[in-house]
Image (tube, rainbow, N blue to C red):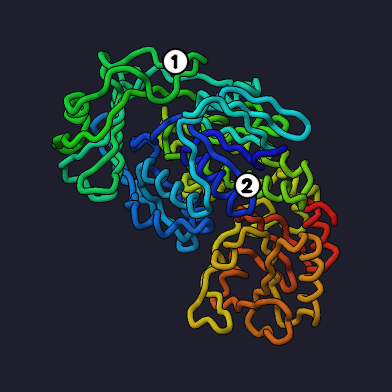
């Protein structure tokens, strides 16, 4: 007998995202965490624009935006010399900007969101061991009431750098560690730095090696920052855990105001006084990547799969995308709408992303963001995680790129937002993202004046059958196209943004996945081509 569809281990931002998305997609799950109470630490504080897009789809963006503060840019000094200011300004096609939010607030928001589905985090509940067979996973939990055995269909390990799930699978976790120890502090600074700007000051030795560093990220609250600096020698301990992985908060001395003030006095470009210390710690940084993200019915995500320097706030955001990628696939397989092979695409899609992020953050930690020659817009889009894509996904098929060369959006790319969509009975223009909030796939049919009569209805009928009914269909109408008799909901491309952003051609079909990536383009649209595309994901009925 199965107790739950999915057991999620770890209730940080990644595990909470996995559980919330499983519930939104209709799957049953339990989520456990060994801590009796969540930490109130401002560890991961950067929220990327792509994460805000994800929270928009989940229905969480409004609460997050109310709690966060904008990150407007970065001021940098190297060896006392001021560097060009970095402005975090994205083009108008990107709906959200960079934000700062303490990790505990992110966890609070996700926890409340999950509870809206009737699922609560089971705290003080530790995974002791697990075994899997062809039909499920048997897990042993240590709970406040004693030992409990749980039978689930799948298990997802979101339990951090020292993951018991990863160790239980025997996965490789190759990489290395930075020799330096660092200290974190959640403090107030009374300097005259412009509001919303991070500060980075670095000093080098004569041979060019880094010697000292200070990074301050603004947080909600007057003059409040999370400060990172090289740890004072008297605070450093051996941070390696029992598994030999030196990553995360350690049990060394706690930095005080005096330790942080000393760094500010040495490196700050402006006179400043440190006060109101809320929390501090010493931590170590490793860079490692699991060799597999899936082993049978067990998966790893977030820090359990990849750890790296916090440069650019990539870690938590990458882990949230891991969970967002996996949840809809698990839900489809659990409902029998897709076969087991769909779950292999999780590793195939996300492992290369983890590998790229580990390499890039290590490089940036040593050389700084923007050190690899990209244009400013390219750097910002990449740091915003808007360039994450799956061009080599097994869900695309060998001919996915045929006819897409030179087009602005290709199969596997993030589906960009568009403004100015006009719909009957709606008195205001809409965004494309307004149409993509469904937990199902979405088929968009771009129709020009010469589209064949009956084409939308035929394509919609075939697509809904191929997707087992788990599909929304919209017609996107070019100027001059008639909206009568389409048999599907229609929006008009009022600003011509859809055609421009996607390079849309008359009578072309676009299939968008539940996680907001383009599964494919079919031009000219026809029922057979759309059916074949959907069967890359859905099992034939």
Picture coordinates of residue 509, whole percent (x, y) = 73, 66
Residue 240's disc is 1
Residue at left offset 50%, top offset 49%: 114
Nearer to us in this view, 224 or 385 = 224
Task: Provide the secondary structure element on which disc 1 rests.
Answer: loop
Nearest to viewer (mark 1 / mark 2):
2
Q: How many C-alpha atoms fall within 10 Å of the one at disc 2: few (<14), some, or many (≥20)? A: some
Q: Quadrant of residue 411?
A: bottom right
Classify 254 as above or below 493: above
Residue at left offset 77%, top offset 42%: 340
Picture coordinates of residue 209, whole percent (x, y) = 36, 20
Picture coordinates of residue 14, whole percent (x, y) = 51, 40
Figure label count: 2
Image quarter in which the N terminus is found: top right
Residue 293's disc is none
Nearer to us in this view, 519 or 198 = 519
Task: Provide the secondary structure element on which disc 2 rests.
Answer: loop
* C-alpha separation, residue under disc 1 versus residue under disc 2: 36 Å
State the residue position of label 2.
Answer: 28
Q: How many C-alpha atoms fall within 10 Å of the one at disc 1: few (<14), some, or many (≥20)? A: some
Classify 213 as above or below 416: above
Classify 282 as above or below 451: above
Q: Is residue 52 visible?
A: yes
Nearer to us in this view, 315 or 279 = 279
């Amino acid at each position: 007998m199965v107790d739950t569809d999915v057991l999620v281990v770890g209730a940080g931002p990644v595990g909470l995202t996995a559980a919330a998305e499983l519930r939104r997609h209709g799957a049953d799950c339990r989520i456990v965490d060994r801590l009796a109470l969540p930490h109130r630490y401002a560890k991961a504080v950067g929220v990327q624009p792509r994460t805000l897009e994800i929270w928009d789809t989940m229905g969480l963006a409004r609460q997050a935006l109310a709690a966060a503060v904008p990150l407007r840019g970065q001021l940098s000094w190297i060896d006392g010399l001021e560097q060009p200011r970095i402005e975090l300004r994205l083009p108008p096609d990107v709906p959200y900007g960079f934000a700062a939010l303490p990790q505990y607030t992110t966890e609070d928001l996700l926890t409340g969101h999950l509870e809206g589905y009737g699922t609560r985090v089971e705290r003080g509940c530790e995974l002791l061991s697990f075994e899997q067979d062809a039909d499920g996973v048997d897990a042993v939990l240590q709970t406040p009431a004693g030992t409990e055995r749980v039978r689930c269909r799948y298990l997802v390990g979101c339990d951090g750098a020292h993951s018991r799930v990863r160790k239980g699978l025997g996965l490789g976790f190759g990489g290395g560690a930075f020799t330096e120890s660092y200290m974190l502090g959640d403090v107030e600074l009374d300097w005259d730095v412009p509001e919303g700007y991070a500060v980075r000051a670095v000093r080098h030795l004569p041979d060019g090696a880094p010697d000292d560093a200070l990074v301050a990220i603004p947080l909600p609250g007057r003059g409040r920052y999370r400060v990172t600096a090289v740890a004072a020698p008297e605070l450093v301990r051996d941070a390696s855990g029992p598994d030999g992985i030196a990553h995360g908060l350690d049990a060394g001395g706690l930095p005080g105001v005096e330790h942080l003030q000393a760094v500010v006095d040495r490196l700050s470009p402006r006179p400043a006084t440190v006060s109101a210390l809320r929390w501090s710690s010493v931590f170590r940084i490793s860079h490692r990547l699991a060799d597999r993200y899936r082993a049978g019915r067990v998966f790893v995500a977030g820090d359990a799969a990849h750890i790296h320097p916090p440069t650019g706030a990539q870690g938590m955001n990458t882990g949230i995308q891991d969970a967002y990628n996996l949840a809809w696939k698990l839900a489809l397989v659990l409902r029998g709408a897709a076969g087991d092979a769909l779950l292999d695409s999780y590793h195939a899609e996300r492992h290369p992303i983890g590998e790229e992020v580990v390499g890039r953050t290590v490089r940036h930690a040593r050389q700084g963001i923007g050190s690899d020659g990209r244009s400013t817009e390219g750097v910002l889009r990449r740091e915003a995680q808007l360039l994450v894509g799956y061009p080599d996904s097994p869900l695309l098929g060998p001919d996915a790129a045929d006819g897409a060369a030179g087009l602005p959006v290709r199969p596997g790319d993030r589906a960009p937002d568009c403004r100015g969509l006009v719909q009957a009975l709606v008195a205001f223009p809409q965004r494309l993202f307004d149409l993509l909030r469904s937990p199902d796939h979405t088929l968009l049919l771009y129709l020009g004046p010469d589209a064949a009569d009956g084409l939308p209805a035929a394509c919609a009928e075939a697509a809904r059958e191929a997707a087992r009914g788990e599909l929304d269909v919209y017609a996107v109408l070019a100027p001059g196209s008639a909206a009568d008799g389409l048999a599907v909901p229609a929006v008009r491309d009022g600003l011509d943004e859809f055609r421009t952003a996607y390079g849309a051609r008359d009578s072309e079909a676009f299939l968008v996945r539940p996680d907001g990536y383009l599964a494919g383009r079919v031009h000219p649209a026809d029922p057979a081509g759309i059916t074949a595309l959907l069967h890359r994901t859905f099992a034939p009925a």
